Image (cartoon, grey):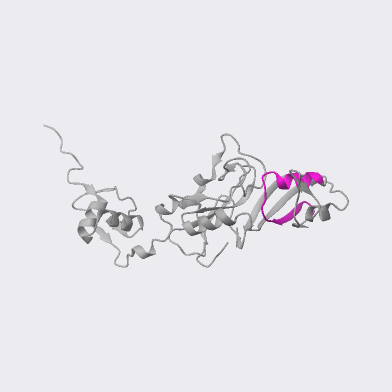
Amino acid sequence: MTEKNPEAGHVRLAKRVAEQLDCSRSTAEQFIEGGFVSVDGAVVEAPGARVAPHQSVAVDPEASLLDMTPVTLLLHKPPGFEAGLGAPGQAGAAHGSRSQGARPALALLHRDTHLAEDAAGIRVLQRHFRQLECFTPLPTEGSGLVVYTQDRRIARKLAEDIESLEQECIVEVAGEIAANGLQRLCHGLSFNGRPLPPIKVSWQNETRLRFALKGIRPGQIPAMCEAVGLRVVGMKRIRIGRVPLAKVPEGQWRYLQPWERF
């Protein structure tokens, strides 16, 4: 005698929801991925999950596809992770180059690394980690703010305006700065044979410099520091345009709030 198939009668959750709501499968999948569907009281976000006939499937009465807006995630990338570095010379990279075998920073984006005190108040969903694009690359050895977005408007803004957006970086340095070195960092240096425009540079403490500049190029900050007798030990990007990293611990992320603009 053969055993009965324990999954006999099971159907895809999306099919069950479509039947209950009398809607299309694609609409049912959107409700599920939006976190509006529960099975036996537990939210299930996978449209392909199998449910048995006896299981209770409920759809939140407040469910609305209008709430399923794309999101933007702000990650505090630690050193040792690669974040969106494309071809050499891609705008937005601050220094250094692609490291072979480096772990992708995208792997840090999941439910467990979400900032607990995130003021955005957005419910974390699995769909928020899909179809993310990065237009703010940061070298493997660098740390700080990296932006990942699903929002086409923000993606277009970053892709088109990254050259004109001011980026703020805290740079840890070692060595003895040359005479008039700070003034030369602000204005008077060249990079790749071209004079640099005026840049805002100031001491944050005895070993840290604050840079605020636009159109930053790969290797630019280390080259500037070397020109005045300093060596870069570490660098953290803390702001892009008007959006700060804020108090996000290394390796965690927060949502871009609706009122924030780059």
Please name whichever residue, 47 or 92, is drawn nearer the observer in this view of the structure. 92
| Side of 59 where 120 appears, left or right | right
Q: Is residue 203 above or below residue 88?
A: below
| Side of 219 where 227 appears, left or right | right
| Magenta span includes 221 | yes
Please name whichever residue, 216 or 57, is drawn nearer the observer in this view of the structure. 216
The residue at the point 81 percent across, 45 percent down is 227
| Magenta span includes 54 | no
| Side of 248 where 23 appears, left or right | left
Q: Quadrant of the image for the C terminus?
A: bottom right
Taking the view exactly as shown, the residue that stands out farthest to the front is 194
| Side of 129 where 65 appears, left or right | left
Residue 24: percent from left, percent from top: 24, 56
Count of labels in the image: 0
Residue 211: percent from left, percent from top: 72, 55
Q: Quadrant of the image for the N terminus?
A: top left
The residue at the point 54 percent across, 58 percent down is 157
Q: Quadrant of residue 36?
A: bottom left
Taking the view exactly as shown, the residue that stands out farthest to the left is 1
Q: Quadrant of residue 65?
A: bottom left
The residue at the point 59 percent across, 57 percent down is 161
Residue 203 visible in the picture: no
Please name whichever residue, 174 or 135, is drawn nearer the observer in this view of the structure. 135
Q: Quadrant of residue 58?
A: bottom left
Residue 166: percent from left, percent from top: 66, 58
Please name whichever residue, 67 or 16, is drawn nearer the observer in this view of the structure. 67
Taking the view exactly as shown, the residue that stands out farthest to the top is 1
Residue 69: percent from left, percent from top: 41, 61
Q: What stretch of residues is rendered in magenta?
A: 206-227
Residue 188 visible in the picture: yes
